[in-house]
Amino acid sequence: MARRIGVGFVGSGFIAQFHARSWKGVRDGDIVAVASRRPESGREFADLCRSLDVGEPTVYTDVAKMVQQSDVEAVWITAPNYERISVVEAIVNEVKAGRSKVRAVAIEKPLARNVREARRLVELVEGAGLLHGYLENQVFAPSVTRGKEIAWRRGAKIAGPPYLARAAEEHGGPHRPWFWRGPLQGGGVLSDMMCHSVEAGRYLLTAPDQKDYLRPVAVLATIANLKWARPHYAEILRRETGGEVDYSRAPAEDYASAEIVYETAHGDLIIGQASTSWSYSGAGLRLTFELLGPEYSLAINTLDPESKIFFSRNVVGEAGEDLVEKQAAEQGQMPFLGDEAHVYGYTAENQHMTAAFSRGEMPRETLFDGLLVTQLLMAAYRSAELGTAVKFPPEGLDEFVPLVQQDRWTPRQLLDRAR
C-alpha cells in the first residue's frame, strides 16, 4: 500500500481551490503547505483545506521557504503562466542544494506560454531528477475515461479503431485579468483552453496502453475575436478589470478552432478537432467530447446532466457560481452538477498523481505530454497567422512566439492577408 505524501501548493487562486475541493477523494496525500504572493489568498486557501479536512497547510509567501518544510515531498504548481519558470527554478535550487525533500512536481495546464519555456521547465525538472506530472484534468474525467474504455473495448475491437475525435470547451470568459492578456497568459483562448481540448482528443484517439500510437503530422487553425473586441464589450471588460485589460487596444482571441492530423501506428491518417471559446453565452462552462469510429460513436456534454433546477423571476439573489463553473444566470431552468471537481476530472487526476508519486513512479500524464501539447498549440497559432495548414512540427517552432503573446495581433489580420 502506498504511503501518504505531503503536498505543497504554489498558487492559491481559483484553480488551486478546485484542486482542494477534489482532495476529499484523495487517499495518498495531504495538503501540508501553500505559497502565495498574496498572504490573504494563502490564508483563504488554508482555511478551505481545514474546512474540508484535507490538510492543515502552513502559509508562505516564499516558494523556497515552503519547499524547505520537512514534510513537503511533492509540489502542485498552479501559479500564473508567466511565473512558472521562476517557481520551478526556486524549487530545483533548493532540491539541488539539499535543503528540500521534494521529489515530485505537478504543473497545471497549459505547461508554458511557448515551446521555449516548456522545454526549459522540462530541462529543470529532469535535471533535478524529479518525478513530474502534467495536470490536465479532462483526460481524467470519469465520463471521458469510461467512454474511451467502452468505445475501444467494444467498438474498436470489433469494427476497427476510431478516426475522428472532437473536443470543445466554452464559457463567457476567465476569472482573473491576467488570463485575458496575451503577454502574461501566452495568448487568448487558444492557449488557455485549447490545451484541454487538444489533449482530450489525443487521449480518446490513442489506443489503450500505447502511448506512442499517434504521431501529429499537420495542423490547421483559425483564431478570431468575435465578442470582446466589440466597443461595447471591450468597455465592459476594461471596466470590470479595473483598466487592466483593454481589448480596444490589445485584443487576444476569444475563439479558436484547430484540426490536427495524426498518423497512427498502423499508418492511417485520423483527425482531432478542437474548438474553444470565451464568447459562449449559456448556463456556464460547457465541455463536449465526441469519438467516432467505423460503426460506433461516443458523445459527452457536461451541460446535459441528470439534474436541473428552476427559479422563477421572483427569486432574486446575488450572482454566483454555486450551480456550475462560469455560471451566467440565476433564474430559469438551469443544470447543476453534484460534484464539479469529480465530473471535470480533478478528483481522479489527483488520486492518480499522488498515488504514482507516493510509489516513486511517473504518472500517466507527464511534462513530456505538456510539452507536446504546447508544441501543438504553437503550431496552431502559426497556422492561424499564416492562414494555411502547417506540417508538424513547423520550422522554427522552438523560437516561435505568437503575435497575440507579443500584443501585435489584430482580429482582422487573417482577412487582411487573404488573397
Image: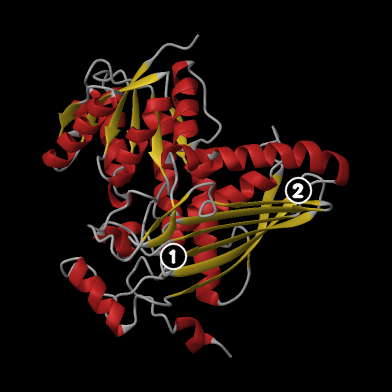
Which residue is under mark 1? 282
Which residue is under mark 2? 264
Furthest toward the right, the residue is 158
Residue at the image position 63 percent from the left and 70 percent from the top: 389
Say few, some or many: other residues with alpha carbon within 10 Å of mark 1 (under 14 / 14 to 19 / 20 or more).
some
Q: Is residue 144 rendered to the left or right of residue 346?
A: right
Residue at the image position 34 percent from the left and 82 percent from the top: 230
Q: Quadrant of the C terminus?
A: bottom right
Q: Nearer the viewer, residue 80 or 162?
A: 162
Label 1 or label 2, whichever comes before in sequence order: 2
Q: Nearer the viewer, residue 317 or 198?
A: 317
Disc 1 element: loop
Quadrant of the rendered image containing residue 174:
bottom left
Disc 2 element: strand
Furthest toward the left, the residue is 40
Residue at the image position 29 percent from the left and 21 percent from the top: 72
Q: Amino acid at mark 1?
A: Gly
Furthest toward the top, the residue is 1
- Residue mark closest to the camera, 1 vs 2: 1
Quadrant of the rendered image containing residue 273:
bottom right
- Mark identifier at residue 306: none
Residue at the image position 49 percent from the left and 53 percent from the top: 195
Location of residue 168 with respect to 250 vertically, above or below: above
